[in-house]
Structure formats: structure tokens, C-alpha cells
Amino acid sequence: MNEETKTKTKKNAAKKTETPAKKRIVITFKAEPGSDVCIAGSFNDWDPKAKQLKDKIGDGIFTADENGDITLINNTALDIFGANQEVVGKDLVYLTSDKSLAEAVRGCVVSHNNAIFEIVHGGKIFLVKVKRLAKTNLTMAVFSDVTENRENAKQREEFFANASHELKTPLTAIKGFTELTAINNKDAGINKYIGSITRETDRMLLLIGDMLKISELESSQNLFRAEITPILLSDILNEVRDTMSTVMNEKSVTFKVSGDIRGVAVNAEQGHIYDVVKNLVENATRYNNRGGEVNAVVKCKKNTVRLIISDNGIGIPPEEHARIFERFYRVEKSRSGLSGGTGLGLSIVKHICALYGWGLSLTSKAGVGTEVTVTFNDS
Ligand code: ADP
């Protein structure tokens, strides 16, 4: 062994003893629906593999300790804020003066509150998620550049809003004139056609409303604009019961609510949670038999609340399970007439669940019934 190799070996030995014990941190982070960032393994700033990994991720990431000092930051985050590695070990103010970010990190460090919000920095829009990392004293912030998404979404939203307005106006007029004609008409044969026109215009209005909802959900801005508050599941279930009561009575379908219902709340925008529950209860009623049953059961466990909506209706054959969440997909074409639905209900449910990171699963057996479970993770 020559002198140079000996020195290298000594240096390496010294390095080995200096290296602190690796901490195993598993980070799973949903930056935006459909773009999960997942880092798993021994994750320390001195670990070359982790360093490579954190610097290759397109999203900006930093972690802060219990004093709010930065412990780790990747190159993307440094580029976003025009900073350098010297910010490591220092307070967040050395990185940015953004008040909402400082408040969110402080809130997570002190009270373990997770937060999702947007900031505008350097002419770009960033979706920021601040989250406490399980089993560590670290708070992590992830920055996803959503500038392009937001612009595309804005254009799409404007197009849908304009198109739906243009379609709604003549349809509402047709509906009004049809109702007037029905009042003045004595001919039973003609009244039959008028009834059909009214039903079809109502269906088109429903369809336009659902298409608008999907468009808004896809732009995903809604969640960040919306007011997310704790919503009592019992209130939502009562509201849905009231809305559905006529249809349920017509079909002699009974609706039972049970489980850990008292005082159980879910953090969401009221309209979103209502749409999820309403669409599921509506399907459980629509695709049920006369005299059938619809059950809503709430189950709580730690930070997780599960809502199970089940029915003993016509069920769905196994080969169709994967496709029924697609837009306009129906098990049988003939079912569209039977249901009076828009074919968009489950797609809306899926979009809302994705937006909040809620779990959604379905089990069903043709001729036996269907059970849909929504798992509201602590959001
Ligand atoms: P629709 O407006 O047609 O009800 P959805 O998106 O809500 O649209 O549902 C898609 C399809 O899935 C329905 O057309 C129906 O064939 C099937 N489906 C949904 N829920 C149920 C259920 N509880 N029981 C049986 N079939 C169902």
C-alpha cells in the first residue's frame, strides 16, 4: 500500500466514525392529485444517495426542526427562493419572508397542523403542502410549481362556464315555454309529448351542472379557494335523507344510518362532502329494487373516519367494477333510461376523494348489492 492509498484509507476510516447514525424516515406526500412524491429510506443530508434523490425531485422540499430551523433543503427549493445551502441550520426567515409559509411551518412545528395553500413567488404559483413527518420531530414543506396547470385550468374553466351558460339560457327558456304550453293545453296526447320535453330538458340541465362540477374539480383550484371546515357527517346524512325522501318513498326504499355518528366531523368544503354522500345514496336508491334497503354506517378509528354506503339492489358484475368511475360509463346502456342519472355521479365522487386524498373502494355482487366505502383520512 503506497502513502497516498494509506492516507485515503485513514481518511475514509475517520469519515466512517464521524458519520452519525442514520435515521429512517419514510415520506409519502401527495403534492397534487396524481403526482405523488415518495421518498423512502435513510434520509440525511450527508447521505449521497438521499442527496441525489432529493435534488432530482422536481418539487422543492425542505424540512424544519422543532425550533423552526431548516435541517434539509433540496436544490429546487434553493432555486425557488434564490438561496444557497447556508440557510441549513438557520431560521426560516433566512430562506423567505413569506408570511403564510412562516405561519404554516410554525403551526405545524408547534401544533402539528398540516396545511395546504398556494403562494405566488417570482411570478410563479406554487402549491405548498406543510406536513408533520410521522415519528420524527420534523416538519416538511413541499413546493409544486402549478403555474401552467393553473393557467390551463383557468382557460378550461372559463370555456366550460361560458359554454354552460350559453346552453343553460335557451334550455331554461324551453323549459318555461313547455310548462306554459302544458298549462294551456287540454289535449292528453300532446301533454304526453310535453312531459317528455320537460323531462329531457331537466336531464340536460342536470348534465350541464355535473359537467361544470367535474371541470371545476379537475382544475383542483376549488379545494384551495374553498373554506375547509369541520362538517358533521350527521348533518350531511340528514340533508341527503331529506333530498332523497320523495324518490325513496316512491320506491319504498328504507334508509338507515348507524355507527359512530354522534359528533363525528370531516374537514372539507360543505358542498364537496354533500356531493359525495348524495351521489352514493342516490345510486344505492336508483339501482335498488322496490322495497330495498340503503344503509349508511360511520366507523371511527384513531384519525380515520369511514363512511360505508351499502344497498341490497341489483349490484354490479365484477368485470364492470373498474370502469364505473369513468365519465358517462354505465353498466348497461339501457340503465341510463332506468336511472335518470347523468353518468357522472361516481366520477364526481372519485374526483372529490382524490382532491382531499380520501380513500374510495367498492365491492359489489350482481343481484346481491353494492357497498362503497369512503375513508376520510385526517385532512
Ligand atoms: P349514473 O348517473 O348513471 O348513476 P354514476 O357515475 O353514478 O352514473 O354510476 C355509473 C354506473 O355505475 C351507473 O350507471 C350504474 O350502472 C352503476 N352503479 C353505480 N352505483 C351503483 C349501485 N349502488 N348499484 C348498482 N349499480 C351501480
Image (cartoon, rainbow, N blue to C red):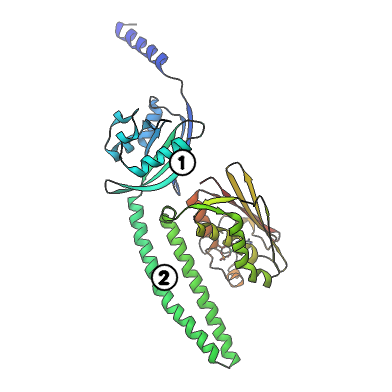
- In the figure, 257 relative to 109: above or below? below
Alpha-carbon span between mark 2 and mark 1: 35 Å
366 or 50: nearer the viewer: 50
Q: Which residue in the rendered view is the most extreme toward the bottom? A: 186
- In the figure, 156 relative to 357: above or below? below
Q: Position of residue 38 (x, y in %)?
A: 45, 38
Residue picked out by circle 2 = 164
Residue picked out by circle 1 = 29
Q: Which residue in the rendered view is the most extreme toward the right? A: 291
Disc 2 secondary structure class: helix
Of labels 2 and 1, earlier in sequence is 1
- In the figure, 327 relative to 49: above or below? below
- In the figure, 229 relative to 175: above or below? above
Q: Where is residue 216 in the image (x, y as percent from the top left)?
A: 43, 60
Q: What residue type is labelled 1?
A: Phe
The residue drawn where x is 45% and y is 36% is 110
Give the side of residue 102 with respect to residue 186, left or right.
Answer: left
Q: Position of residue 143 (x, y in %)?
A: 37, 42
The residue drawn where x is 37% and y is 14% is 12
Disc 1 secondary structure class: strand
